[in-house]
């Protein structure tokens, strides 16, 4: 189905585009069609491969933010014991992440069959990538200019639960290949008053549990398929992990002083180019 070289290319592409706000699913769906790879992207085996390389990215995020995750998990457990969340930064942050995960989790379960079919619909994916660029332009133009001089985790914990749910709804757009999980979650964060740095941080934390949940559902499917896909998945996962590590280190520094505008420009141009190529070439 997939050669090792193709798996490596898709893995690197996933590791970069999952964290950059440019849609990993969109790029993974479009590249094989633009390069005329003879693979069926709508099969459950290919989707399981995609989830496996997503899992590698999630493991990198977990390792990169492991100190925060330890504090968050301890905070949530502490809140269950004391039945208090107020004034406990990490307990509150943990529950905010749980609330933010609900929309994408529910919609992913309800619509997984229909969403899976979109992998083979290149023009739709290209159009979604174009609109992802417009979304990023809008996020920068409309974001609330609330001061964010406080420490990063304290800033995230100041979000309200409706705001976290709204960011989760925004993240759900990424179930459509072409819309970026990071970009959509950052859009929700910016419109909730977070700085670019804090919006990216919340987006990276929010991505981790939803990717792990998807992996728990889909990765076992790899073991029911042809054994050759397991080797391809391993190659893709290693490449995705390496690319994701470089990407997250870069982006956590980039968003301290920069905006979404370069990614917005890229997505609108790339989406429009891919759409015209698939329709007329």
Image (spheres, rainbow, N blue to C red):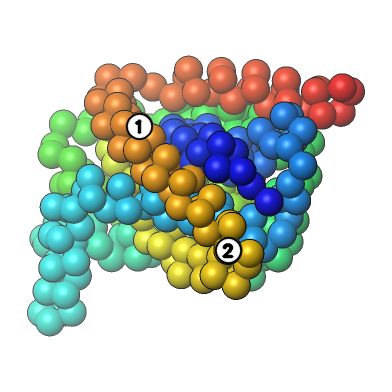
Q: Is residue 122 left or right of residue 68?
A: right
Which residue is pictured at 42% across the width and 40% down the height?
239
Could you tell which of marks 1 and 2 lies nearer the N-terminus?
A: 2
Question: Residue 219 at x, y = what percent?
Answer: 51, 65
Q: Is residue 80 left or right of residue 170?
A: left
Q: Residue furthest bottom?
A: 81
- From the image, which quarter does the C terminus lie in? top right
Q: Residues within 10 Å of mark 1 (few under 14, many from 20)?
A: some
Judged from the image, the secondary structure of the residue bearing numbered disc 2 is loop
Question: Residue 258 at x, y = what percent?
Answer: 33, 19
Q: CA distance from mark 1 to mark 2?
A: 30 Å
Q: Residues within 10 Å of mark 2 (few under 14, many from 20)?
A: few
State yes or no: discs 1 and 2 in contact (Cβ < 8 Å): no
Question: Residue 48 at x, y = what percent?
Answer: 57, 60
Which residue position is annotated with label 1? 247
Viewer-nearest residue: 251 or 82: 251
Question: Residue 222 at x, y = what percent?
Answer: 56, 65
Judged from the image, the secondary structure of the residue bearing numbered disc 1 is helix
Which residue position is annotated with label 2? 227
Which residue is pictured at 54% across the width and 70% down the height?
223
Viewer-nearest residue: 229 or 128: 229
Q: Is residue 142 left or right of residue 68?
A: right
């Amino acid at each position: 189905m997939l050669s090792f070289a193709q798996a490596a290319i898709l893995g690197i592409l996933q590791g970069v585009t999952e964290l950059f706000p440019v849609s990993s699913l969109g790029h993974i769906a479009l590249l094989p069609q633009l390069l005329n790879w003879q693979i069926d992207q709508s099969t459950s085996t290919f989707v399981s491969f995609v989830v496996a390389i997503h899992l590698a990215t999630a493991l990198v995020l977990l390792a990169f933010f492991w100190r925060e995750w330890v504090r968050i998990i301890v905070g949530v457990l502490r809140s269950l014991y004391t039945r208090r969340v107020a004034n406990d930064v990490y307990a509150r942050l943990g529950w905010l992440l749980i609330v933010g995960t609900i929309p994408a989790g529910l919609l992913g379960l309800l619509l997984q069959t229909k969403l899976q079919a979109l992998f083979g619909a290149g023009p739709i994916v290209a159009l979604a990538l174009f609109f992802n660029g417009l979304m990023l332009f809008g996020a920068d133009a409309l974001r609330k200019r609330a001061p964010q001089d406080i420490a990063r985790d304290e800033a995230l914990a100041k979000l309200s639960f409706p705001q976290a749910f709204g960011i989760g709804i925004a993240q759900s757009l990424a179930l459509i290949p072409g819309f970026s999980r990071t970009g959509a979650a950052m859009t929700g964060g910016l419109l909730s008053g977070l700085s670019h740095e804090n919006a990216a941080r919340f987006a990276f934390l929010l991505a981790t549990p939803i990717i792990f949940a998807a992996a728990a559902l889909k990765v076992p499917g790899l073991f029911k398929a042809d054994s050759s896909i397991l080797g391809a998945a391993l190659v893709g996962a290693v490449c995705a992990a390496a690319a994701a590590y470089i990407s997250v280190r870069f982006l956590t520094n980039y968003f301290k002083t920069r905006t979404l505008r370069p990614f917005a420009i890229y997505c609108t141009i790339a989406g429009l180019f891919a759409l015209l190529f698939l329709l007329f070439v």
